[in-house]
């Protein structure tokens, strides 16, 4: 077996494994000495094709993540988050349907309550704050924001590679023409440009949230459903939010008002993301609207934007399922901390 064949065999074995793989397990299927196997594993890890977990005798290998590809779900949750998610592991069809809990929003008093642990919110603020002479509205911020648009669009199901997305967002026509994936991505970019512009002038409001949804859904759904509050139930899931337009409009305005009052923009972003996700105020585009609207308080207070790059759809949905089912934010906090630390570091490089 040649070196290239051996490496390909290693990659295939790791990809096919249902759990992280020990080097000793690979020895059973790869015709190679242990020394050669170790060299190949190191080479594949250095190239990003494999990821290493643990050290010494506890070393395991999992498939690497190509930053140009829409990510797959592969997240290791904390013990606390795992306990929450395991309690939700039964098939959705077997769970009792739960209703929207009004107290999740109404019991929240800005600056007295906190969905994030207060010390974590402070640490993340220090990590993400870009200074008074902020770079978040400057020209060099455009490329990181393009990656943000792509990562959010991936969570909406597009399969476009990052390299192709950047070409499209920089004005080069896509090879497949204006496909649905291309339209979703371009709408994300337009909505993000709007968020960036509005955040330079004012904080979050219900009107801004509605405008973001309208830009995201333009040319994708019936024009009557763009920028309009949902007036019908959401079917096929174990969570049933309200579908009374007057109630949804009132709660949407409350989210905007409370987000404005929160002093720490990190807490404001998390509050916005989870409350819009939980409320589901629109017929379409609720997830993307929540992700992009959460950037308004961040950019308004000169903090790095929030990107979910590297997060798979399954992990994203798992994090929110704790809120839908139990109003438990532990998994959402964990995911938010991970992505915001990464976002802040990437934006300020």
Image (cartoon, rainbow, N blue to C red):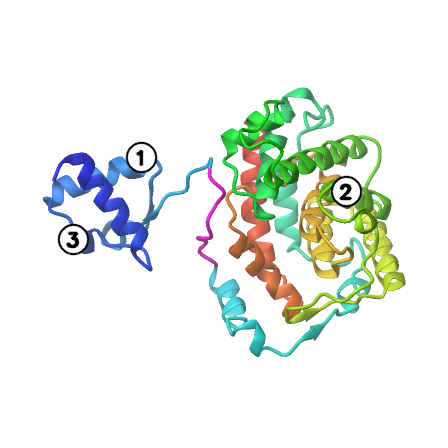
Of 30 and 203, the residue lying toward us:
30
Find residue 146 and report its image quarter.
top right
Residue position for label 3: 29
Disc number at residue 212?
Answer: 2
Q: CA distance from mark 3 to mark 2?
A: 52 Å
* Start-end of magenta stretch: 69-77
Q: Position of residue 22 (x, y in %)?
A: 24, 54
Element on which disc 1 rests = helix
> Residue at position x 60%, y 65% from top?
322
**Mark positioned earlier in the residue sequence (2 or 1):** 1
Quadrant location of the N terminus in the rendered image: top left
Residue to which mark 1 is pinned: 46
Q: Is residue 231 above or below residue 304?
A: below
Q: Quadrant of residue 5?
A: top left
In the rendered image, residue 185, in percent from the top left (x then y), is placed at 63, 37
| Quadrant the C terminus occupies | top right
């Amino acid at each position: 077996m040649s070196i290239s064949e051996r490496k390909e065999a290693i990659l295939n074995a790791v990809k096919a494994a249902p759990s992280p793989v020990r080097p000793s397990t690979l020895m059973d299927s790869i015709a190679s000495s242990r020394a050669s196997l170790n060299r190949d594993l190191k080479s594949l890890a250095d190239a990003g094709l494999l990821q290493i977990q643990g050290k010494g005798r506890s070393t395991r290998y999992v498939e690497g993540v190509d930053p140009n590809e829409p990510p797959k779900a592969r997240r290791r949750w904390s013990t606390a988050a795992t306990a929450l998610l395991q309690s939700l592991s039964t098939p959705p069809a077997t769970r009792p349907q739960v209703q929207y809990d009004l107290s999740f929003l109404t019991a929240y008093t800005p600056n007295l309550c906190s969905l994030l642990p207060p010390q974590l919110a402070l640490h993340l603020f220090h990590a993400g704050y870009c200074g008074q002479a902020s770079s978040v509205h400057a020209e060099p911020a455009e490329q990181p924001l393009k990656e943000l648009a792509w990562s959010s669009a991936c969570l909406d199901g597009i399969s476009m590679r990052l390299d192709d997305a950047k070409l499209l967002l920089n004005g080069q026509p896509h090879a497949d023409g204006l496909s649905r994936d291309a339209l979703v991505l371009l709408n994300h970019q337009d909505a993000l440009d709007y968020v960036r512009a509005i955040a330079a002038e004012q904080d979050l409001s219900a009107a801004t949230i509605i405008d973001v949804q309208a830009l995201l859904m333009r040319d994708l759904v019936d024009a009557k459903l763009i920028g309009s509050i949902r007036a019908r139930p959401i079917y096929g899931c174990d969570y049933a939010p309200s579908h009374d337009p007057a109630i949804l409009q009132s709660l949407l305005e409350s989210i905007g008002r409370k987000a404005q009052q929160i002093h720490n923009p990190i807490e404001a972003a998390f509050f916005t993301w989870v409350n819009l996700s939980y409320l589901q105020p629109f017929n379409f585009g609720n997830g993307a609207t929540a992700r992009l609207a959460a950037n308004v308080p961040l950019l308004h207070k000169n903090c790095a934007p929030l990107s979910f790059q590297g997060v798979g759809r399954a992990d994203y949905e798992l994090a929110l399922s704790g809120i839908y089912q139990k109003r438990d934010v532990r998994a959402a906090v964990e995911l938010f901390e991970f992505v915001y630390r990464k976002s802040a570091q990437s934006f300020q490089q």
